[in-house]
Amino acid sequence: NAGVTQTPKFRILKIGQSMTLQCAQDMNHNYMYWYRQDPGMGLKLIYYSVGAGITDKGEVPNGYNVSRSTTEDFPLRLELAAPSQTSVYFCASSYSRYDEQYFGPGTRLTVT
Amino acid sequence: AQKVTQAQTEISVVEKEDVTLDCVYETRDTTYYLFWYKQPPSGELVFLIRRNSFDEQNEISGRYSWNFQKSTSSFNFTITASQVVDSAVYFCALSEEGPGKLIFGQGTELSVKP
């Protein structure tokens, strides 16, 4: 049981490039979330999904897109990377909206 | 607006001291959930506890204890006899009715020195 996995662990992007952060969970959780953590700050929600085919915006969605074609996978797409997107990105999942969220190990992204 | 405040940015203690991390929250909902997560230097987020708004009983788990007081909108976390391995950033978070979105405080960095 791998839990929540994220790839890559680290990435450096040039301004204007695009990339997809991968997230997968093997716990059959319906709920999945993407957060970003800026230095010295708490996490902020980017997008979330309550099931396959259903996604919605969180607090800071600008510059990102998501899709959820399967229960297991929840990729986050960055289009036209900007320095403001330099952050650590965490994916999380939970069985229900009331339960604790399990977090992946994070992806450290630098945009220069 | 929903908000979580962790007023202590950094705390430094010597091993074996007791330490309390403060968390104050704001919400208009009557049903909500409060969480504490630990983020050690390795960077992952580790779940510690979940408490729902209808359960004000304090909880103890080993050296960790939590004090939930609705009257003061606080959910404080105490580590008894701290150890070096407790050094980490600790986050308090709030989840309201709806799809389980977590609102995090800014975190308290705890440093336990030998």
Image: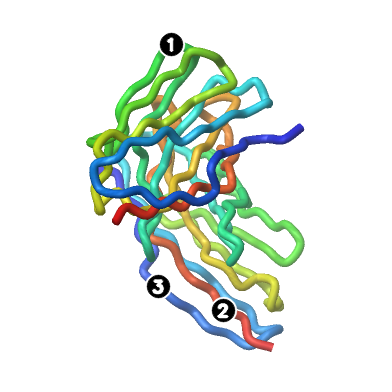
Check disc 3 and report the residue beneath it. Answer: B9
SS class of the residue under badge 1?
loop
Q: Amino acid at mark 3?
A: Thr
Q: Name the image quarter holding the N terminus of chain B.
A: top left
Q: Residue B90 placed where, x, y %?
A: 52, 62
What subunit carries mark 3? Answer: B
Q: Is residue B10 above or below residue A10?
A: below
Whether callout 3 and callout 2 share a subunit is answered: yes
* Horizontal side, residue B11 vs residue B66: left or right: left
Residue A100 picture quarter: top right
Calculate the distance from the C-alpha at mark 3 to the C-alpha at mark 2. 11 Å
- How many C-alpha atoms fall within 10 Å of the one at disc 3: few (<14), some, or many (≥20)? some
Check disc 2 and report the residue beneath it. Answer: B111
SS class of the residue under badge 3?
loop
What subunit carries mark 2? Answer: B
Give the total number of marks visible in the rendering: 3
Does any portion of residue B72 appear in the rendered image?
Answer: no
Residue at screen point 49% across, 71% down: B109
Check disc 1 and report the residue beneath it. Answer: A53
